Image (spheres, rainbow, N blue to C red):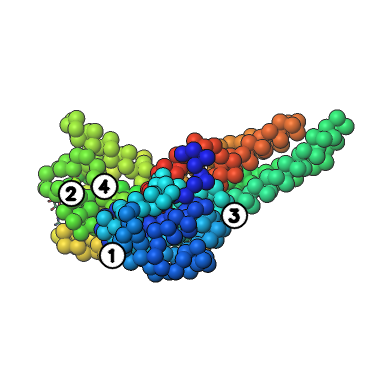
Amino acid sequence: MEISSMNDTICAVSTPAGVGGIAVVRVSGPEAIEVCNSIWRGKSLLETPGNIARVGSLLDTSGEALDEAVALVFRAPRSFTGEDTVELSVHGSRWIQRETIASLVKHGARIAEPGEFTRRAFASGRLDLAQAEAVADMIAASSRASARVALNQMRGSISDKLDELRKKLVNLASLLELELDFGEEDVEFASREKLAEATGEITEEIRRLLTSFRSGAAIKDGIPVAIVGATNAGKSSLLNALTDDDRAIVSDIHGTTRDTIEETLEIGDYLFRLIDTAGLRETSDKIEQMGIERSRMAMSRAQIVLYVIDPTNFTELDLSALPQDADVLRIINKSDIYHDHAIDGIHISAKTGEGIESLRSILADIAARKTNEGEDTVLITNARHAAALEAALGSAETLLNGLQTALPSDLLAQDLRETLHHLSTITGKITTGEILNNIFQNFCIGK
Ligand SMILES: Nc1nc2c(ncn2[C@@H]2O[C@H](COP(=O)(O)OP(=O)(O)OP(=O)(O)O)[C@@H](O)[C@H]2O)c(=O)[nH]1
Ligand SMILES: [Mg+2]
């Protein structure tokens, strides 16, 4: 997308493709109100103030009445894009949608590129980059928790947090630059200890944000839950019971599941990704060995592990490959035929459904604990942000190291500038056209 094309008037259907009761056609740009008015019969849109809706008729390309519609007028800068914008609510037939767009194009609008409305909002300073990305997350949100995180980010939670960090860094920078100015005279204005202390705090904050990516990604994409255990323990039966589906094959043959099977599950506010795995045992079967390798891989990525045990045939397994912060639940299955509670764990029957409801609420509680570090905690959910924070952390650590080993201030200033630079790429204070293209191309048309 050329930057020069940011000054014309664009249009697109913003509601999903297909037939609906109503479709919304969005028009934005300097000529938005004029273009709409030229296909409009009713009270003039040119004289309509911002945030006011009008009812009227829309005209097709040949000037004949096409539909009765509502035009909602927004005047710059008080609109999503920051430009003059009109939202036309038309009846949602494919024909009317197509004709409306054709008519708008005939009168001077251009069909919008994917994400162009949001890109314009960014260009006009209505949103920063992290907020624009949150718009996409909001549209893709599939659980209350992911919508809540996206909403916070859209309202600027990450941006505020980063601003705070940037201010602290700029403050440090000015102290260092002051020292640089008087470098010749060998004066130390800022005590190195104080600077190191402040840098240490900033480094910690960047590290905390980076760590939150694990929970953040889990909220956005679903919390990975690996179902592991010996063959025939009832892992696939548990997957089916939790999802109330017959997705996985269940049989009394040991080694039934070969490949990992993934299903999403919504419990309360949270989305989970359940991963049923091949039973762990010694085997000479090549394919089963590959399956077991995948089981171990799923375990190493899991945040919750359901370790399923058949108490009628139990030997403890080696689960050493688990990540440190994973919660392991011992699930004692087959409670319908095994009534003794001698083995410690959560007793359930995947076959009769006994204990499944309480297992669900245990999962929801763990999810809440894992992801809710407090109402005002900022969570990182975006891989681009995590990569930038990683880079910022690297520079901040170098800076800290330099302060502790009495490196000259000009080198320190360089590390500091780099830390600032990486943080600034997140909100788009510093950015390249290429990064912008990547981000906005992932949006759909009309957003
Ligand atoms: N009585 C009883 N049988 C169960 C229960 N859960 C599973 N089974 C039986 O145990 C056998 C193995 O079940 P699966 O779910 O296939 O076990 P798995 O752990 O996935 O086994 P692999 O895929 O071979 O690793 C089947 O015959 C199931 O019907 C249960 O709660 N009670
Ligand atoms: Mg299985």
- Identified by mark 2, the residue type is Ala
Q: Which residue is mark 1?
A: 21
Instruction: Residue at the far left: name it.
Output: 252
Which one is earlier in the sequence, the residue at label 2 or at label 1? 1
Ligand 2 within 8 A of label 2's CB? yes
Which one is earlier in the sequence, the residue at label 3 or at label 1? 1
Q: Which residue is mark 4?
A: 262
Residue 138 placement (x, y as % from top left)? 42, 56
Q: Are marks 4 and 3 in contact (CB under 8 Å)?
A: no
- Identified by mark 1, the residue type is Gly
Of 396 and 18, nearer the camera is 18
Of 174 and 66, nearer the camera is 66
Q: Which residue is mark 2?
A: 248
In the image, taking residue 371 as reference, residue 78 lies left or right, namely: right
Which one is earlier in the sequence, the residue at label 2 or at label 3? 3
Q: Residues within 10 Å of mark 2 (few under 14, many from 20)?
A: some
Q: Residues within 10 Å of mark 4 (few under 14, many from 20)?
A: some
Which one is earlier in the sequence, the residue at label 2 or at label 4? 2
Q: Residues within 10 Å of mark 1 (few under 14, many from 20)?
A: few
Q: Which residue is mark 3?
A: 160
In the image, taking residue 230 as reference, residue 48 lies left or right, namely: right
Which one is earlier in the sequence, the residue at label 1 or at label 4? 1
